[in-house]
Image (cartoon, grey):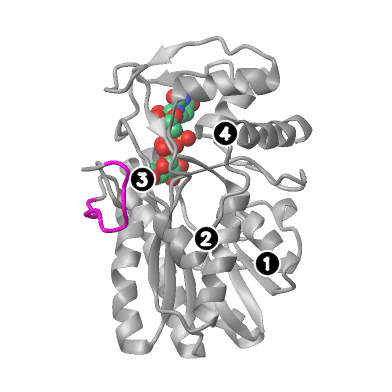
Amino acid sequence: MAILVTGGAGYIGSHTVKELLKRKYEVIVFDNLSTGHRELVPGGHLVEADLRSLEEVRDVFRRYPVEAVMHFAALMQVGESYADPQKYYVHNLVSSLNLLQAMLEAEVKYFIFSSSAAVYGQPLEIPIREGHPLQPINPYGASKFMVERMLPDYDRAYGLRYVSLRYFNAAGADPEGQLGEWHDPETHLIPNILLHLLGRNPGFQVFGQDFPTADGTAIRDYIHVTDLARAHVLALEKLKAGEPSQVVNLGSSRGYSVLEVIRAAEKVTGKRVSLKFGPRRPGDVPVLLASSEKAETLLGWKREFSDLEFIIETAWKWHLTH
Ligand code: UFG
């Protein structure tokens, strides 16, 4: 039996494929390579197909004995989702519906869903627990919320067992140096700082210096991508052991401001950022910080790599070689 990994040629997907292969799972990667990269698929079998086509999705379930699905494939740029919401609802919502339909037809019962802290919207309390109201403030977050909203209905009616994993700020790269973050365009803080230090992002700016935080810059919860990847394997194992569906935050429970991240990057690399401040990015909230207690107690998740300097060290190694 195989695990079908949609978006397995992407950043978090590829790191999870690697963890699955280490644990001797058979892996089928389903990716249209629109934002993913063939070079990032660390093994298993790559099916180049598109989730927007129900026929292409059905076909993969006909060809392979799929036991469970991990669904990473999605678009994830908040700014772009404001500008073109239709694109986000098609790629993130219609694609998920196709996948769920094909799963029901093939009687596949286990689903691990890549959700996001973006489902919470403006935090009402920090740290954010899973019971926090879900009020997404952009189409990206709304598309993730809509899939999450459907899952309990599928559980009740069809016995679909799922774990919805709400990622905070995924960061870092494979400690073994094989995989890393490769987005085009890059929008995330840590790679943007590192690209700047490599001379490839001269326009790097800190977005906003008037947030209500100690140094005026926004605070985020950075979590190492390999820790995230391992949480997916734990979630799968819980479902296979007969445990019920769950919704779980994945963060480090520790926040860093943009300036703190820049200082840490300067320390790790021995280089200096030429600091420029720009306006806030639309939709950016002052503080996003997870409570990850539930992941620890329910999944037995332990973070091993999420120390900020180690995150930056692994990302730096990746950027130096790619
Ligand atoms: N930032 C900069 N300069 C940059 C890039 C980012 O100052 O060049 C700042 C942002 O304004 C933000 C912080 O660094 O304050 C982190 O930004 P990222 O883009 O790295 O991450 P976000 O917190 O904005 O986004 C993440 C995920 C999204 C998700 C969102 C909300 O990447 O997919 O969290 O959950 F939608």
Q: What kind of element bears circle 3?
A: helix
From the image, tell me which residue sits under label 2. Answer: 72
Q: Nearer the viewer, mark 4 or mark 3?
A: 4
Q: Nearer the viewer, mark 1 or mark 4?
A: 4
> Is 180 placed above or below 87 here?
above
Q: Which residues are magenta?
A: 126-135
Are dots 1 and 3 in contact, CB under 8 Å? no
From the image, tell me which residue sits under label 1. Answer: 20
Q: Mark 4 and ligand 1: say if the CB distance to the nearest ligand atom is below 8 Å.
A: no
- Earlier in the chain: of badge 4 and badge 3, it is 3
Q: What kind of element bears circle 1?
A: helix
- Earlier in the chain: of badge 2 and badge 3, it is 2
In what quadrant does ligand 1 lie? top left
Q: Tell me: 285 left or right of 201.
A: left
Viewer-proximal residue among 114 and 55: 114
Q: Position of residue 284 (x, y in %)?
A: 32, 33
Tell me if residue 127 is in the magenta stretch: yes
The residues tagged by marks 1 and 4 sit, at their Cα atoms, a distance apart of 25 Å
Question: Is disc 1 surrounded by few (<14), some (14 to 19) or many (20+) residues within 10 Å?
Answer: many
The residues tagged by marks 1 and 3 sit, at their Cα atoms, a distance apart of 31 Å
> Is 119 placed above or below 164 here?
above
Q: Position of residue 279 (x, y in %)?
A: 34, 18
Question: Is disc 2 surrounded by few (<14), some (14 to 19) or many (20+) residues within 10 Å?
Answer: many
From the image, tell me which residue sits under label 4. Answer: 308
Q: Position of residue 4 (x, y in %)?
A: 60, 73
Q: What kind of element bears circle 2?
A: loop
| Image quadrant in which the C terminus is located | top right
From the image, tell me which residue sits under label 3. Answer: 81
